[in-house]
Image (tube, rainbow, N blue to C red):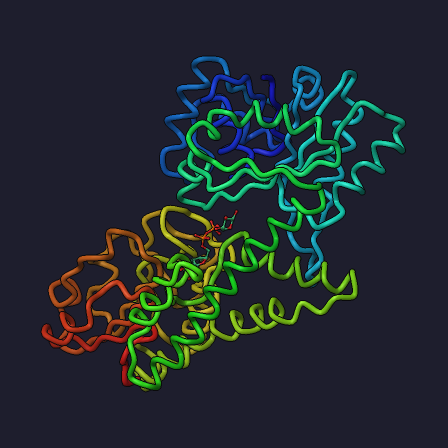
C-alpha cells in the first residue's frame, strides 16, 4: 500500500517506519525542513531505542521517504495518516486542533483521487465529524475520515507497534474496515486484536484508556502516601492487588507523579470534553488535581530529609519523565529543580540523554556528564528516573561523603540492603520515617 504520514513526531515517525518495514511505501511529511534534511541524511531526530536502525533499512530500500512536499506525497498515497501534535491551548485544558485542521485543508487541496484520511493523533470526540464538515465545505466527496488512535509508549514504541494488545479502528462506514484490516494484517497474524467501532467511539477509547491508566497510577500514588504513614510497604499492596486479574499488575507502580506528553494532556482533554457535553467527569478531574499536588509533596519530603535546603548539594539522577526517552514534557523534575535551586540548594543533574534546555537559565543548577562526578560529595542524591544504569550503584563509593541521604522516587533499591549498608535511604510508599 502507499501511505502518507503527516507529521514526523513520535507517532508519525514510528508508525510510518514500522509500516514501511511491512513492505508498504511510506511518505513521511513534515513542514520542518531541518528535520526532513536530517532524516534524509541518515540523522536521528527523536530518541527512541531501535528506531534509527529500522529507518536506515527502509530508507535504503526506498520504501521510506521523507519530504516537505505534502502535495506530492498525498497525491501518491491511498491512505493518509494525520500525526500532528494536539497540545492543550495556552492556559486552558481545551485541545488545540489548529495543526490537525491545517493539515486537513492541505490534504483536501492536494487530493485529486479517492483517499482514506485517518486521524492517528489523539483528538477529542467529534473531531472526525468536524473534519468531514471541512471536506464537505470544499465540496470533496471522495475522502473518507477514519479514526485509528495510537497506543505507543515512548521508549517502547517499536515494541508497542509490533505487538499491540489491540488495533482500534473507528469508521461510520464499515466497508473501510477491510482496507485497514489488510494494512494491519501482519500484526493481526501475530495475535493483535482488531477492534472495529464507530468513529466517535474510537476517539473516546484513546482518551478513556490514557485517563484510566493515569487514574490507576494516581490511585497507587495516594495509597503510597498512606503506606508511608502506616508503616506498610506499597510494593506488597501493588503485588497483592495486581495479582487479582480483574485489576491487573501493570501501571500500579508508585512513583513521583505521572508525566510525559500524553497522560497530563489527555486527562485534561477528557475533562474538558466532559464539560463540553455537560458531564462532570469528577474522577478524572480529581486525578489531575491529585497528580499536580503530588509534585510538590517531594519537595516537602526533601525539607524533612535535609532540614535546611540552603547550600545543600542535591544531585539528580535522571530528569526525563521516564527512561529511554529524552522527553522532558511534564516531568516532575521541572517542578522540583527550580524550587530547590530558588531556595539556595546547589543542584546538579546527570541524565543519559544529556543536558536540558529547561534548566539552562536556572542559577545554582548544573549538568554533570557522569554519574560519579554528579553524585560526588552530595548531601542528597535523588533517583528521579529509572534508567537501568542507576539500578546498581555503590553509593558509599561514589558519593565519598560521610553523611549523605538518598531519596529514591522509583523504589529501585532494597530496603534491607540499604539498612545493612547503613545508608540513610528514603523511598516512595515504604516505611521511611521522614
Ligand atoms: C502513554 C501511554 O502508555 C501510551 O499508550 C499512549 O499512547 C501515550 O501515553 P508514555 O507517556 O510514553 O505512554 O509513557 P508511560 O509508560 O505510559 O508512562 C507515563 C507516566 O506514568 C510516566 O511518568 C511514568 O513514570 C508513569 N508511571 C507509569 C508510573 O508512575 N507508574 C506506573 O506504574 C507506570
Query: Which corner quadrant holds the C terminus?
Result: bottom left
- In the rendered image, the vertical position of residue 386 relative to residue 5, given as above or below: below
Residue 384, position as x, y percentages in the image: 35, 63
Q: Residue at x 75, y 36 (%)?
A: 172
- Tell me the quadrant of the picture where the N terminus can be found: top right
Residue at the (33%, 86%) spot, across then down: 230
* 316 with respect to 120 (left or right): left
The structure residue drawn at horizontal position 80% and vertical position 22%, both measured from the top left corner, is 142
Query: In the image, is 67 to the left or to the right of 176?
Result: left
Figure quadrant of residue 233: bottom left
Q: Nearer the viewer, residue 155 or 149?
A: 149
Question: Is 87 on the left-hand or right-hand side of 373?
Answer: right
**Residue 299 location in percent, x, y?**
41, 77
Most foreground residue, 174 or 13: 174
Tell me the quarter of the picture where residue 191 sits: top left
Is residue 65 depicted above or below 214 in this figure? above
**x and y, in percent, of residue 308 in the image:** 34, 85
Percent position of residue 70, x then y: 68, 24
Residue occupying the point 66% across, 41% down: 197
Tell me where residue 120 sits by quadrant. top right
Q: Nearer the viewer, residue 310 or 176?
A: 176
Report the number of numbered marks. Answer: 0
Amino acid at each position: 500500500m502507499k501511505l502518507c504520514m503527516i507529521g514526523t513526531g513520535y507517532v508519525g515517525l514510528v508508525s510510518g517506519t514500522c509500516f514501511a518495514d511491512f513492505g508498504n511505501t511510506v511518505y513521511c511529511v513534515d513542514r520542518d525542513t531541518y528535520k526532513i534534511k536530517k532524516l534524509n541524511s541518515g540523522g536521528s531526530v527523536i530518541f527512541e531505542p531501535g528506531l534509527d536502525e529500522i529507518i536506515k533499512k527502509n530508507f535504503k530500500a526506498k520504501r521510506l521517504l521523507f519530504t516537505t512536499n505534502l502535495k506530492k506525497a498525498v497525491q501518491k498515497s491511498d491512505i493518509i495518516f494525520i500525526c500532528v501534535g494536539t497540545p492543550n491551548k495556552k492556559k486552558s485544558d481545551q485541545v488545540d486542533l489548529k495543526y490537525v485542521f491545517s493539515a486537513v485543508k492541505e490534504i483536501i487541496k492536494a487530493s485529486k483521487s479517492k483517499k482514506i484520511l485517518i486521524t492517528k493523533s489523539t483528538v477529542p470526540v467529534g473531531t472526525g465529524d468536524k473534519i468531514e464538515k471541512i471536506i464537505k465545505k470544499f465540496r470533496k466527496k471522495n475522502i473518507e475520515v477514519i479514526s485509528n488512535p495510537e497506543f505507543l509508549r515512548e521508549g517502547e514504541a517499536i515494541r508497542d507497534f509490533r505487538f499491540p494488545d489491540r488495533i482500534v479502528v473507528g469508521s461510520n462506514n464499515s466497508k473501510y474496515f477491510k482496507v485497514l484490516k489488510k494494512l494491519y494484517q501482519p500484526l493481526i497474524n501475530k495475535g493483535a486484536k482488531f477492534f472495529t467501532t464507530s468513529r466517535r467511539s474510537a476517539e473516546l477509547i484513546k482518551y478513556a484508556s490514557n485517563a484510566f491508566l493515569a487514574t490507576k497510577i494516581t490511585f497507587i500514588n495516594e495509597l503510597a502516601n498512606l503506606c508511608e504513614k502506616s508503616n506498610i510497604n506499597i510494593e506488597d499492596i501493588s503485588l497483592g492487588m495486581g495479582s487479582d486479574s480483574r485489576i491487573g499488575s501493570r501501571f500500579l507502580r508508585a512513583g513521583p507523579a505521572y508525566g510525559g506528553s500524553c497522560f497530563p494532556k489527555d486527562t485534561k482533554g477528557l475533562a474538558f470534553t466532559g464539560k463540553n457535553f455537560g458531564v462532570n467527569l469528577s474522577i478524572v478531574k480529581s486525578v489531575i488535581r491529585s497528580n499536580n499536588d503530588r509534585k510538590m509533596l517531594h519537595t516537602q519530603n526533601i525539607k524533612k530529609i535535609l532540614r535546611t535546603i540552603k547550600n545543600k548539594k542535591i544531585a539528580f539522577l535522571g530528569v526525563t519523565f521516564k527512561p529511554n526517552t529524552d522527553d522532558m514534557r511534564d516531568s516532575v523534575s521541572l517542578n522540583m529543580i527550580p524550587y530547590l535551586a530558588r531556595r539556595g540548594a546547589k543542584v546538579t543533574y546527570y541524565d543519559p540523554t544529556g543536558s536540558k534546555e529547561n534548566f539552562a537559565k536556572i542559577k545554582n543548577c548544573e549538568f554533570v556528564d557522569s554519574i560519579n562526578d554528579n553524585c560526588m560529595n552530595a548531601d542528597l542524591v535523588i533517583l528521579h528516573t529509572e534508567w537501568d544504569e542507576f539500578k546498581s550503584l555503590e553509593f558509599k563509593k561514589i558519593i565519598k561523603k560521610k553523611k549523605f541521604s538518598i531519596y529514591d522516587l522509583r523504589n529501585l533499591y532494597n530496603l534491607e540492603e540499604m539498612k545493612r549498608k547503613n545508608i540513610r535511604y528514603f523511598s516512595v510508599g515504604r516505611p521511611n520515617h521522614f
